[in-house]
Amino acid sequence: MQTVALKLVTIVAEPVLEERLVEALHRLGARGHTVAEVHGAGSRGMRASDPPGQGVRIEAIVSDAVAGRILDHVAEHYFPHYAVIAFVADVHVVRGEKYV
Amino acid sequence: MSEVLAQNLLSPVTLAFVLGVLARLARSEFQLPKDVYAGISIYLLLALGLHGGMELARASFDAILWPALATLAIGSLTPVSSYLVLRRLGRFGAQDAAGIAAHYGSVSAVTFIAAQQFATAMGETPEPFLPTLLTLLESPGIHIALAIGLVASRSGAGSSHSMRETLHEVLTGRTMVLLVGGLVVGLLMGEKNWGAIEIFYDTKGPVFKGMLVLFLLEMGVVAGARLGDLGKVGPFLLAFGIGVPLVHGALGAWLGTLSGLGVGGATVLGAMAASASYIAAPPAVRLSLPEANPTYSLTASLAITFPFNILAGIPIYYQIAKLAQG
């Protein structure tokens, strides 16, 4: 099967940020996204969620350029004061035109 | 006094809370599934709204006016007093102080319910329009504290969250929608329709009390999980989390009495003034004051003030209310 190399951007964040992050993702060029409710802990400890300890994992498959823009945006606006991690992975997808 | 304290400690609500804390401390795997927890909190708030709304239909405007003004006065005062204490005595930064003050300016609906149940059990049924007062206290405290925080730290930079966004957040939150919505529905449906659902939504009835016990059990687990953070926040916040509710609670009970509430109503208003929000305030603070450390505000409100009010605060406000009535 023919596959296309793209980037999978993953952001794990405090649930209060979900709406804003999803909005930013689409503004920066993502065509779709997936959100999962997760729980865990990190260097920042407590999260402002009810019940506490919850997080969201937001994923989007995007082009290299969009992935860079998303990471820059998250780093600039959210890394300083929020419990957020973000990373990019290489993925190979079918129907590559769907994502860019 | 000790008799009243003992009676409170042996109520099923308090015991369930203690059981939850102990389960957590013993590292039990028990906890309420989070959807069940969310479901019960929706039920409690809606019941409070519906029953309160139905009773509101019977109340006269004159009876509510002064208690409502007293509530608004409390809602405007408690965030400011909390902020000043934290800033001046506790040497907290502007954002941290404002973040914690937003929690203490707002109100905990569960503490309200526990106080209502306690006063009723003591034979001092609170005025039926108190849930209406609860809705008045939820929002102003949060906004006043956030405004102080934004002005004091002059941080346009870290926060792009406008007051309008925050207002939308708080006013469309679970508590406001279910409480205010429930009050309106309760007010509109009238007593005849109330009869059809009373058995389920009666806040003095067995279903409501049973649900409350289950909810407090989970609150115990949640608070117990936060106890480990007590060491991180330092002795000042521990003293703050008990001292400030006592002062605010006494003020609430006294103002409640002045405004014409009976012992039960003044007890509940005292508990409202003394309580700290942990549902509406945290996300609003998190988005508006990103530099405020949520460990401080959540530990203070959940691990210190909430347990204090449930275990000892409410009976103390009850005694103060009795003294104030003379």
Image (cartoon, coloured by chain):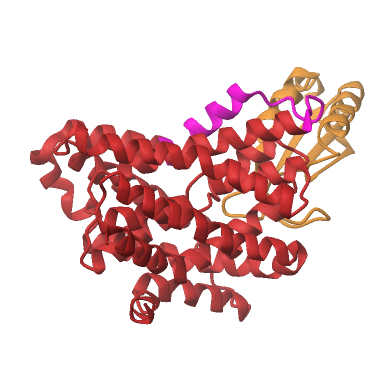
Above or below for B52 versus B275 = above
Quadrant including the C terminus of chain A: top right
Residue B266 in sight in this render: yes
Q: Nearer the viewer, residue B320 or A16?
A: B320
Figure quadrant of residue B210 = bottom left
Magenta-colored stretch includes residue A35:
no
* Rendered shade, chain A: orange
- Residue B277, given in percent of the width and then of the height, sits at 53, 49
Q: Residue at coordinates 70% horizontally, 55% vertically from top-left? A: B296
Q: Which residues are magenta?
A: B153-176
Residue A38 in sight in this render: no
Left or right for B83, reference B47: right
Above or below for A89 versus A3 = below
Above or below for B179 versus B25 = above
Left or right for B183, reference B111: left
Q: How many marks?
A: 0
Magenta-colored stretch includes residue B154:
yes
Quadrant including the N terminus of chain A: top right
Figure quadrant of residue B28 = bottom right
Q: Residue at coordinates 64% horizontally, 54% vertically from top-left? A: B298
Q: Nearer the viewer, residue A46 or B80?
A: B80
Chain identity for the colour red used in the image: B
Task: Name the residue at the front extreme.
Answer: B326
- Residue B205, given in percent of the width and then of the height, sits at 21, 60
Q: Residue at coordinates 76% horizontally, 32% vertically from top-left? A: A60
Figure quadrant of residue B23 = bottom right
Q: Residue at coordinates 33% horizontally, 34% vertically from top-left? A: B181
- Residue B40, given in percent of the width and then of the height, sits at 40, 54
